[in-house]
Amino acid sequence: MGSPEGVCDALNSLNMEKSSIHFENIKPTSQSHNLRQRDFDYVRKDLTKFNKSYGDMKPHSEVIEEFKKLIKEKTGRSAQAKAKFLIEGVFLFKKNHTDKELCQVADNFGIEFKVRVKELHIHRDEGHYDKTNNEWKPNYHAHLVVENINRETGKSVKWDKIDLSRIQDYFAEALNMQRGIKSDKKHLRALEFKVKKEQENLDNIQNEKIAVHSKKALELKGKIFID
């Protein structure tokens, strides 16, 4: 794939909580969620100013179309329907981690695992209020969006079990945190579940709009026919 580009070129390098990360295919709402282009009930707007985003913010839809053309050019075959062009991982960090440190973690990840990190989104505005004392419990985490297509070959990036284990080791060591276990993955999946529900809500709203529009169109056609 060549030398992966640094996601934080403008920022040039880390005490014992648990770390964990796993990658999944990006969702249609990933970018708008990460860039806070919509309102969320679990986000404190007064803390959103402490979020940071780095990298290439080209819309995911445009990048996916580029990859489809690249795959056709490089392999002579059309991209598979279930192909994963961009994947996203969520990792936890601690309050004392700086933007510069997190950027370095992302850049070194790309170099170590020979992938191009497209985006890094650092979120410090999510969390919840403790039910007993109403104290704010922050949920410090970052979203890492990675290209899952090798631009030189047009083939998907393949990680086996050893690679996935090494990725867990890498983040634990790079962030100076204890390596996470299954319970931590459940916590991360909860974040992704929220994004999934957001997409479902948007789809339902869109479907309702289409239904209303269709109904009005039928009523208009019926009236014209009767007249």
Image (cartoon, rainbow, N blue to C red):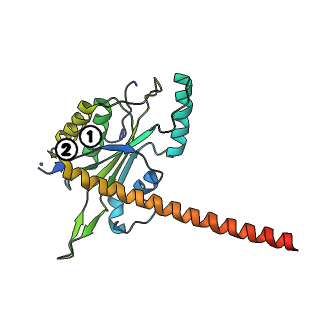
Label of residue 105 in the image: 1
Q: Is residue 17 left or right of residue 58?
A: left
Direction from residue 170 to residue 42 in the image, left or right: right
Q: Residues within 10 Å of mark 1 (few under 14, many from 20)?
A: some
Q: Disc 1 vs disc 2: Cβ atoms closer than 8 Å?
A: yes
Q: Is residue 108 above or below residue 221?
A: above
Furthest toward the left, the residue is 16
Which residue is drawn at the image coordinates 32% and 59% (left, top)?
A: 50
Residue 175, numbered label: 2
Q: Is residue 97 visible?
A: no
Q: Quadrant of the C terminus?
A: bottom right
Q: What residue appears at the point 51 percent right and 39 percent down from the top-left corner?
A: 63
**Rendered-image quadrant of the N terminus:** top left
Image x and y of residue 82, in percent: 47, 39
171 displayed left or right of 72: left
The three-letter code of the residue at mark 1 reads Val
Regarding mark 1 in the picture, which secondary structure is present there? helix
| 198 left or right, relative to 210 | left
167, 121: nearer the viewer:
167
